[in-house]
Image (tube, rainbow, N blue to C red):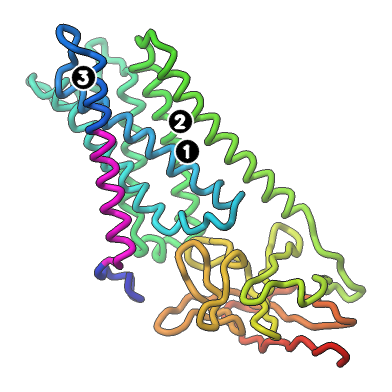
Amino acid sequence: MSARYRAVSWTRHKVVYDLVLAAACILFVGVFSLVSMVLNPPPNDISPPILIMRALGTLAIVLLHVTLAIGPIARLFPRTSFMLANRRHLGVTVFLVAGLHAFVVFGFYGGFGVENPVLAVLIRPDGGVGFEFFGFLALLILLVMAATSHDFWLAFLGHGFWKAMHMAVYGAYALVVAHVVFGVLHSEKSMLYPSMLLAGALVVGVLHISAGLREWRFDATSDEATEDGWLDIGDPMSIPDKRARVVCIGGGQRVAVFRNDNELTALSNVCAHQGGPLGEGEIIDGCATCPWHGYQYDTSSGQSPPPYTEKIPTYELRIRGGRVEVDPTPKPAGTPMPPITIPKEGE
């Protein structure tokens, strides 16, 4: 992605990621189809369209669970944040696979009559709708999310609204579960498939609840305030070099205090790109680098290096009695704030 949000050639990393993802999807469909044919020999064999339909539908659900699990896993285990870098590629793949599943469904069940194939599948003869309607609504949500996944829309809409809009993925997930429960599982005699779906939902639910509780507990804490309202962070050397300590200053606001050798600076913990946790990244080439997508900010000004224009608030620091203190009042985004130097022992 260029500074002007124009499509540019993919990096080698992204190309490899997408090729591996595509190969994994093809392998999944192949293995699923082969196993199904082995388990259902003639005369109980499954027709090829239905087999492909089931394989693509199952793959879409598996990919959706993986996509939803990456976020909370990265919050619970920060070292896994690298998985977030190409999560949008994974999300778009979910839509593409689900779209292929829907294409086969509409073609097989609605493509041989005089009615519109989509309406023929979604609308029953009595005028009602069935489980297919849940899946269709989920597909529309995934379509909107895939169509707005480009950084152009992120910049145009602003990361706050963009992220809020993409929270609709949870609505899509609920609709997908309803689509499966009232559809294929309604007539399924084996408990294997219901158990797998339940296990997936429980894993996703437990991960999100655990990550939410972790963040809530952190936001509920605040470092001790001094007599003039500054917050006492602690020993400056307790901050890892080239990294940051994240502190809560009240109201759910977080500040990332970075140490670069013997210098300290403080920035908002919220990356201007997608609201990522900047303080969980590290200093690379003199810039605080977000662990989610690599967006960078000058640690002394909160300004992205040219030609990029993103800015985040800065905070004033001081050292008193050998301890770091931060002024909880943010400076306007992009305000230069010279770093403070950690005194040598004995000074």
Residue indicated by mark 2: 174
| Figure check: 77 above or below 197 | below
| Callout 2 crowding tier (Cα within 10 Å): few <14, some 14–19, many ≥20 | some
Residue indicated by mark 1: 170
* Residue most extreme to the right: 227
- The amino acid type found where label 3 is placed reads Met
Q: Is mark 2 on a helix, strand or loop?
A: helix
| Figure check: 167 above or below 338 | above
Asked if the residue at tag 1 contacts the one at tag 2, i.e. Cβ–Cβ closer than 8 Å, the answer is yes
Q: Residue 37 carries which label?
A: 3
- Whichever of callouts 3 and 2 sits on the residue coming sooner in the sequence is 3
Left/right placement of residue 183 relative to residue 42 reads right
| Callout 3 crowding tier (Cα within 10 Å): few <14, some 14–19, many ≥20 | some
Name the image quarter holding the C terminus.
bottom right
Give 86 or 333, whichever is nearer the viewer.
86
| Callout 1 crowding tier (Cα within 10 Å): few <14, some 14–19, many ≥20 | few
Q: Residue 185: give x, y in percent of width and height.
A: 38, 15
- The amino acid type found where label 1 is placed reads Tyr
- Whichever of callouts 3 and 1 sits on the residue coming sooner in the sequence is 3
* Residue most extreme to the front: 38
In which image quadrant can residue 342 be found? bottom right
Q: Residue at x 27, y 39 (%)?
A: 97
Q: Is mark 3 on a helix, strand or loop?
A: helix
Front label number (3 vs 1)? 3
